[in-house]
Image (spheres, rainbow, N blue to C red):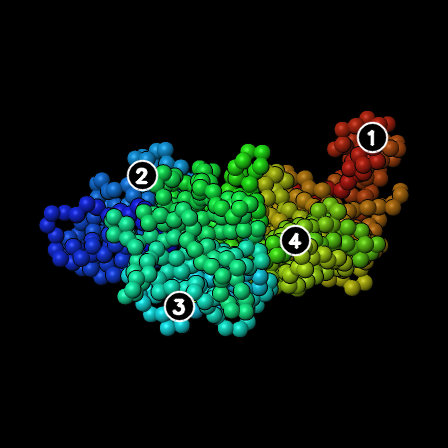
């Protein structure tokens, strides 16, 4: 969540602290005093002791506040959980608990707390936005990044935040003790904040040493963040409200003993002396509330800043003031409810005269402070609805203070997300949007290859997609990321493409032409089915026989859905059938002998199996005869060899071979021809080891067609269906 410094600049921040009881132990009394004076770091050990002694919701809520405001989120969540366990906790305790849970990405728990909070505050826009955010945040966090961020070289082991740019100088606020400033701010337990600078390029490279911004800017109390005009001559920065006295400077307090922040206007910077010509207070400062975190437009004529002045939407709001031709600033006005919420609006930045960036915990986001942007609409005289920046600019932690180089794509921002350096840190960002465009074509004629599977793999990115009918694929990439793309398609050799996702422009496309080389083989997909039940037969052996001069046999196994996949080489014919105990498979003869490599489409097939039982009539596939002949041709022998295997596996089986013709020709001729062919099959089986006493033969001629058509109207396919040889099981 927010740092203690961020809260210390805003006296009007709402806390969970209850009214003081009439009698309490001394630790609790001291803790309450420190808490009231925003000394959260110093109050923690006293509250920890008091919580053990008191064991009440109010003490746990105050301790949780201190943890939250010093960014000890896990401890804060544990204490808030104890505080809300009572029957009627303060609603703000639930709100703060929900904020902590959002920061920890415990979105479901956060939503539960927000629903309870809304029961008592049904009209609060901030709570409704947070509830919406809790539902959307998981998908946003896992979404496609809109750029890259990396830790900047300027960071120390202290807190660096409030990043802005003055030409090539990165200006930021820090509570580092590198320069010997060791006076402690009791709000955070750290040193007071000062303004520092370092030379940095638009590529994120920083050189030289961290140095102070200029003479007479930093004081003994808080100074920063700051904002500069485009030419760097004028600036506005935040400073603790203090007065100079004879015996030393001292802070100014309001009636509640709270020290606020003010804005200081610095003009006419001289680079030779490294100091401004004048530094004066903003004319609308007020010791009763804070004005802080300024944002000047590039021209210096518009000032947006944060204030907790009374009459706002709640928490801290954004205000603006305009400078006229005489150099006078207008009375500050609120940016209105489109921008401001009941929560905290902080760290504004004007990219140009019309584009406002700011951080908020009151709009739908991801958790903690998130960065939004809005455009000034002249026709409405108002800013547009704020838009949330995506990942990685926003996280569930506090994200703030974007500042852009002239390219409009790169710059620096601040965040307290986990990093190699502790605390708030400055990050370099690049909002480059990168795409990958692939044109996938065939080596033969370079025709588009549709349906090619593309697997993208990189750190944090693993996806699968396929090319369209035009062989084209377009997808977004994580910038500055090493990728490997694997492209594969049935019938082609797979390819791999390794590349770095880096572009020369803010929006760029990496284009590659992928030429796929056809592989040796036609993809074959078959499903084994029970003919009677029309259901798949899982885990069934499927025999794939490569025929020809160099025969080869593979036995595959169907999967749980009866499916089987393989590749069939061009230049060979194949016989394919299934094997299962107690069943007989029809077979497929796949003619690929004269097919040119890479030209055949994938094959999809269904292999039906019939059960071996008395009365079953099963067709013997691929039995062909020459015209007016009954002798067994060579191409019929593989099918009959399968029947031999079945008969040998079932020695008690007796069969009858039935032969049929089509209807063309004389009846008597067809009857005689079919009888001769049936007898020829029996004779061949006998010659190959099957006992003649186990077989009969019968010719049916054209009397028993299976295709229902009038002879003169039958198609060639129907005639072929009627010309068949079957075996009928007579005995098992």
Identify the mark nearer the N-term, 1 or 3: 3
How far separated are the C-alphas under marks 4 and 3? 37 Å
Looking at the image, is mark 2 or mark 1 earlier in the sequence? 2
Disc 2/disc 4 C-alpha distance (Å) = 44 Å
Q: Nearer the viewer, mark 3 or mark 2?
A: 3
Name the residue beneath numbered marker 4.
507
Residue 329 in picture, x, y percent from top left: 48, 45
Element type at marker 2? helix
Please say if 624 is above or below 276: above
| Mark carried by residue 714 | 1
Sequence-first tag of 1 and 4: 4
- The nearer-to-camera label among 1 and 4 is 4
Query: Which mark identifies residue 176?
Result: 3
Task: Estimate the spatial distance between the alpha carbons at disc 3 and disc 2, rounded to whole Å.
Answer: 41 Å
- Residue 91 lies left or right of residue 485; in this view the side is left
Q: Label 1 vs label 4: CA separation?
A: 65 Å
| Location of residue 111 (image quadrant) | top left
Q: Seen from this angle, which residue lies furthest left?
A: 23
């Amino acid at each position: 969540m927010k740092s203690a410094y961020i809260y210390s600049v805003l006296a009007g921040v709402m806390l969970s602290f209850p009214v003081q009881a009439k009698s309490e132990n001394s630790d609790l009394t001291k803790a309450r005093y420190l808490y009231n004076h925003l000394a959260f770091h110093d109050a923690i050990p006293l509250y920890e002791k008091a919580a053990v002694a008191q064991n009440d919701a109010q003490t746990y809520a105050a301790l949780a506040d201190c943890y939250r405001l010093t960014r000890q989120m896990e401890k804060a969540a544990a204490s808030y959980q104890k505080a809300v366990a009572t029957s009627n906790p303060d609603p703000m305790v639930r709100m703060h608990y929900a904020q902590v849970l959002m920061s920890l990405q415990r979105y479901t728990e956060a939503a539960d707390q927000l629903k309870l909070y809304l029961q008592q505050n049904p009209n609060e826009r901030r709570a409704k936005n947070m509830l919406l955010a809790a539902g959307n945040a998981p998908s946003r966090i896992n979404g496609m990044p809109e750029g890259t961020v990396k830790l900047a070289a300027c960071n120390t082991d202290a807190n660096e935040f409030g990043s802005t740019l003055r030409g090539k100088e990165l200006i930021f606020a820090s509570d580092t003790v590198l320069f010997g400033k060791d006076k402690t701010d009791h709000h955070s337990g750290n040193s007071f904040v000062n303004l520092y600078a370092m030379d940095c390029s638009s590529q994120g490279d920083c050189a030289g040493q961290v140095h102070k911004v200029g003479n007479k800017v930093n004081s003994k109390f808080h100074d920063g963040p700051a904002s500069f005009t485009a030419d760097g001559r004028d600036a506005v920065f935040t400073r603790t409200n203090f007065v100079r006295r004879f015996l030393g400077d001292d802070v100014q307090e309001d009636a509640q003993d709270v020290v606020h922040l003010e804005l200081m206007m610095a003009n006419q910077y001289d680079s030779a002396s490294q100091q401004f010509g004048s530094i004066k207070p903003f004319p609308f400062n007020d010791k009763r509330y804070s004005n802080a975190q300024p944002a000047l437009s590039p021209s210096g004529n518009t000032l947006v800043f944060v204030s907790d002045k009374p009459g706002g939407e709640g928490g801290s709001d954004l205000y603006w003031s305009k400078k006229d031709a005489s150099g006078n600033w207008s009375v500050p006005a609120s940016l209105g409810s489109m921008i401001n919420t009941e929560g905290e609006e902080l760290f504004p930045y004007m990219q140009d005269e019309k584009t406002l960036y700011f951080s908020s915990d009151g709009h739908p986001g991801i958790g903690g402070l998130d960065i939004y942007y809005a455009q000034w609409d002249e026709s409405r005289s108002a800013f547009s609805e704020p838009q949330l920046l995506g990942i990685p600019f926003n996280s569930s932690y506090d994200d703030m203070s974007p500042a852009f180089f002239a390219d409009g794509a790169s710059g620096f921002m601040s965040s307290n997300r986990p990093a190699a350096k502790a605390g708030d840190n400055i990050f370099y960002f690049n909002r480059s949007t990168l795409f990958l465009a692939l044109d996938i074509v065939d080596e033969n004629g370079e025709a588009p290859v549709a349906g090619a599977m593309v697997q993208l793999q990189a750190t944090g990115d693993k996806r699968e997609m396929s090319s369209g009918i035009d062989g084209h694929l377009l997808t977004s990439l994580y910038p500055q990321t090493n990728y490997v793309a694997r492209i594969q398609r049935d019938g082609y050799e797979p390819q791999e493409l390794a590349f770095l996702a880096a572009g020369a422009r803010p929006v760029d496309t990496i284009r590659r032409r992928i030429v796929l080389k056809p592989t040796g083989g036609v993809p074959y997909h078959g499903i084994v089915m029970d003919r009677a039940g029309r259901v798949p037969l899982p885990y069934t052996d499927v025999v794939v026989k490569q025929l020809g001069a160099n025969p080869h046999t593979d036995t595959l196994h169907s999967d749980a859905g009866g499916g089987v996949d393989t590749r069939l080489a061009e230049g060979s014919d194949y016989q394919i059938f299934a094997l299962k105990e107690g069943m007989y498979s029809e077979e497929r003869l796949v003619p690929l002998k004269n097919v040119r490599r890479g030209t055949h489409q994938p094959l999809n097939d269904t292999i039906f199996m019939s059960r071996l039982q008395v009365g079953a009539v099963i067709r013997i596939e691929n039995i062909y005869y020459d015209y007016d002949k009954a002798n067994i041709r060579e191409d019929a022998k593989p099918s009959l060899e399968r029947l031999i295997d079945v008969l040998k596996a079932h020695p008690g089986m007796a069969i009858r071979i039935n032969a049929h013709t089509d209807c063309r020709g004389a009846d008597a001729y067809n009857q005689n021809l079919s009888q001769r062919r049936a007898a020829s099959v029996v004779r061949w089986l006998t010659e190959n080891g099957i006992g003649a006493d186990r077989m009969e033969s019968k010719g049916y001629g054209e009397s028993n067609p299976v295709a229902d058509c009038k002879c003169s109207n039958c198609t060639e396919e129907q005639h072929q269906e009627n010309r068949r040889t079957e075996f009928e099981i007579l005995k098992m």
